[in-house]
Amino acid sequence: MIPEQFGRVAILLVFALAFPALPLTASYLFSKLGYRTSNPTPVKEATYECGVESEGTSWGQFHARYYLFALGFVIFDVDVIFLYPWAVNHAAMPIAVLFKAFLFIGILAFGLAYAWRKRALEWR
Amino acid sequence: MSSAADRRPATPMARQILEHHSLLSRARALPGEARFVLAVLTLGALVAGAGIGFLVVTGQLDGRWYDLRDLGNATAHFRGWTQRQGIHSAVPYLVTGLLGGIAILSLVGGWLVIGVWAERRLIAKFQIRQGPNRVGPFGLLQPLADAVKLLQKEVLIPIGADKLLFFLPPILIFIPAMLGWGPVPWAPKMSYADLNVGVVYTIAISSLGVLAVFLAGWSSNNHYALLGAMRTVAMMVSYEIPISISLLAIVLFTGSLQLSDIVAWQAQHNVWMIVLLPFGAFTFLFASTAEINRTPNDIGEAESEIVAGFHTEYSGMKAGLFLAVELGNALLVGAMMSTFFFGGYSLFGLERWIPGYLIMGAKTFLVYFGFVWLRATLPRFRLDQLMAFAWKFLIPLSIIQLLFVAVESMVVVQSGLPGIVTIGGSIIANAALTFVGVRAWANAIGYSPKEMASPPIMTNGVGGLRAAEQIRAAS
């Protein structure tokens, strides 16, 4: 049952790749048939920013402002994925399980509060 | 001064409003023959409907292969027929898989063609403009003209760009937009791939788009593109969490990760999740606009700040693909929203009469209309406001809602009380949480409603519906 359904997802993936390939092929054919101009000059091919010539490459060091957000995301997203198996079985479980889950969520919330207190959630 | 001169509208906008014909006035102006044909067609539709209704009531249609209310019946019969013929089971599997894939492809592709027109036209109506109305009837051929224009545009690859990585993103960005349609249920037995981990699959697929966006921004070797890509990554990463937590609340109630089970639960209990979890629905709506890079949260391609964001350097058909995928994503989120929060294919028993996929489609387009409305109404938010909103507002409140829902779902299943008491109580508790909690939390973190902007003066005084009424009344 399960590999069968993921096989369908694989078929869909082929369609997903074919979908944008179609207009791109049409675009390529247009250029081959001469309906599409192709006359690149150094000015045209220059990086388009704001009219002034670009200074240097953008592949240098940059200030990853969202570094702390990304760390928070990794922690939270993994933890939420851990909560899904609990959520599926939760309703029929004894009440002790609920308290344990609350403990888990509480630790998560404490982590969020700590990050907030440490000003990790400010966009600097 | 003659009275005729008085009646002439003063401004072009007023003239447009006066000349605007409503649907009703157009119907009244129809000639007699057209009315007769319309009446005959209506009568025929009624008779056909009554015949189908008779078949439905007597149950002669249930589970037959020609039962068009649920195309799952047809595929099941097809599978059984091939089994009786002794054909290998891979054949019906491949055939149904390919047909379903083509159906999804034509749905998304068709929407990319019509949606461009529909969205521009709708936004024009919101802003009392006409919108595209030159190419073809009502401007319907405008998307076609756009496509031809994009095909003829010169495709430039900037000198500094990484050629391979620059080529990939317009293709990769379509993967989440298409794969997301897999588990969407269109009728009780009709969904392309009814995965038992549908919710997790949805979350996983939706976060794939961020890779294509960052590739596009990075490979362009353009400062603005890189800035836009980094903003988008930060935003998508932040809004992923509210989405997962609000879907977790749904799973707590339904006890299943399968999307068809979630819809079946809503149909069985006769309650939509948006009533049960208003805050979760709001979270999902807002976070998904961020996730698909759509106005009001399209800071990744904020044209007033960073040219066009991550797709600044793309031209010709590649740029067209980036613009098109936004429409496809918006429709997909509409489908997700109607599956999770608006009861999917169910409509309080009416799904026995109307094909489920029509109900589902109608709900999807209604949610989509909501997105267009949002886009036409709200200005763009600032990036730091957006991030603060996700981390300081949506996530803490979603966690509090999760605690509420954990207790409620346990009561619903284990208390033995009738559903109207337990679910009704949950609705009241969650509504209270939404309306009290949101305000209290906003006050607690220092965003009191007093600081909000004053009510819209301009739209009431200068433009909008009231102005239209005044102009009509005056002339």
Image (cartoon, helix red, strand yellow):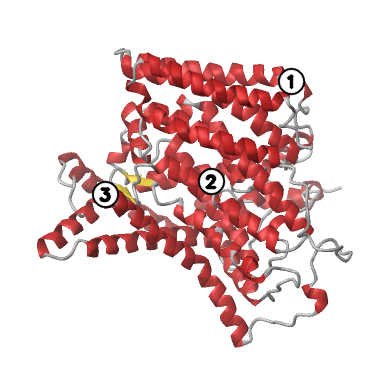
Comparing labels 3 and 2, the label whose residue is closer to the camera: 3
Percent across and percent down for residue B187 are 32, 45
- Marking on residue B448: 1
**Residue B101 left/right relative to A79:** left
Mark 1 chain: B
| Kind of residue at badge 2 | Tyr
| Kind of residue at badge 3 | Met
Residue B128: tell me if it is visible. Answer: no
- Which residue bears the numbered disc 3? A1
- Which residue bears the numbered disc 2? B368
| Kind of residue at badge 1 | Ser
Q: Residue furthest right?
A: A52
Percent across and percent down for residue B313 are 72, 65
Query: In terms of depth relative to the viewer, which is nearer, B25 or B111?
Result: B111
Q: Residues within 10 Å of mark 2 (few under 14, many from 20)?
A: many
Q: Residues within 10 Å of mark 3 (few under 14, many from 20)?
A: few
What secondary structure is marked by label 3?
A: loop
Query: In terms of depth relative to the viewer, which is nearer, A75 or B164?
Result: A75
Please identify the quadrant where the C terminus of chain B is shown: top right
